[in-house]
Image (tube, helix red, strand yellow):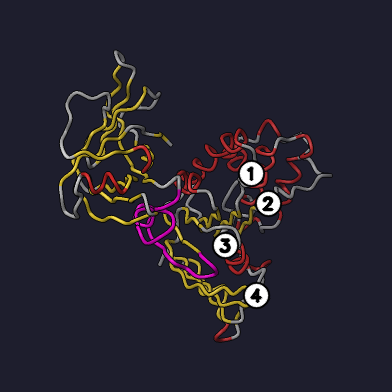
Amino acid sequence: MQELHGRFQLQADDFSLDVDFHTPGRGVTAVFGSSGSGKTTLLRCVAGLERAPQGFLQVNGNCWQDESRGFFRPTHQRPLGYVFQEASLFAHLSVRKNLEYGQRRTPPSRRKVAFDEAVELLGVAPLLARNPKHLSGGERQRVAIARALLTSPKLLLMDEPLAALDANSKAEILPYLEKLHEELSIPVLYVSHAIAEVMHLADNILVIEKGKLIGSGALLEVLTRLDLPLSHAYEAGVVIEAKVVEHDEEFHLTYLDFSGGRLSLRREDLPLGHTVRVVLNARDISLALDNEVHSSILNIFQATLLEMAEESPGQLMVKLDVGGALLLVRITKKSGVLLNLQVGMKVYARVKSVALL
């Protein structure tokens, strides 16, 4: 079965980890939580760098740890790649030599990722002759990821790989991470406390709080659970997959179809028929009881109100169903009272901004 199953109980000083998770054995699973929640500790347990006295780990049918029968595969025997916050490249070696070091860790008979493939995926061909100290932060991380891939891992662990980068470097490296997501079948556990990164990359998510797993599942399902902190963060919103169906040259717009209707956004150079991810942030959507025809807002959708939760004394988070797609909307409590919002009623979601990922 294509699944990752981990169960770890670990006590370290005043912190305890007690997690039992199942997640698909392919795609990207984000491990999300605030600082100190136990994300990195969980990743270190998966890597075998921390040995949980009560631990179990199975990766796509292969057991790596089962303490109930005294079985523990040490880190060097686990076919995994690990990318840290800092690139940790060998400063005395060129980029090429760093990559070759990663490849040499795997016997030729078990190499699944070719040198040229990793170089192309991460766009590091122009960097091969350079020394790591002459690379930007984003370039160093791309080399570190390529080196991890060249170990031909059966599991890739990424511990906040963008955390040490500035905004420009993050923007530089995200397309390469998306490319990995699209082209490789290697499962990835991706630690992050940044909702934007999770929305960009993840298929599934584990939410950790104070060493406990408080939510898990498909990305959209977890993003829209009103009992979890993700749905109440400032950046709260949803990710929708939509198909590019038309370019409007007169008004410089691109049209996308999803299950709830058609989205309009500024003209993007995307091929027709291509499926893209878009983010609709809760703060960029308002509600109305009727479809106001004379409006500057182009994206207006009829919806059914599914659920409401109070965020603070003055704000509500509202969950909507739009033709099978889920939306989150943040409004004031006063607006909820004035509109007399009730679960099950029909409303109109007025989307002021659509962000293409």
Q: Position of residue 334 (x, y in %)?
A: 29, 46
When the figure is inspected, residue 75 is found, relative to residue 239, above or below; the finding is below
x, y percent for residue 218: 37, 57
Q: Which mark is residue 14?
A: 4
Q: Which mark is residue 313?
A: none
Q: Is residue 346 left or right of residue 173?
A: left
How far is the residue under mark 2 from the one under mark 1?
Answer: 8 Å
Can you see residue 277? no
- Nearest to the eye among marks 4 and 3: give it: 4
Quarter of the figure with the N terminus = bottom left
Residue 172 image position (x, y, % from top left): 58, 34
Mark 1: amino acid: Phe
* Along the line of sight, the residue nearer the viewer: 287 or 102: 287
**Please, what is the three-letter code of the amino acid marked with disc 2?**
Gln
Find the distance from the CA under tag 3 to the CA under tag 1. Answer: 31 Å
Query: What's the amino acid at mark 4?
Result: Asp
- Gap in angstroms between the C-alphas marked 4 and 1: 44 Å
Q: Nearer the viewer, residue 279 or 188?
A: 279
| Dot in front, 3 or 2 | 3
Measured Cα–Cα span from mark 4 to mark 3: 16 Å
Name the amino acid, label 3. Lys
Q: Which residue is mark 1?
A: 115
Question: Crowding at label 2, few (<14), some or many (≥20) Cα neighbours within 10 Å?
Answer: many
Q: Which residue is mark 3?
A: 39
Residue 147 image position (x, y, % from top left): 66, 48
Q: Please state which of the two labelled residues, at mark 4 or mark 2, is closer to the viewer.
A: 4
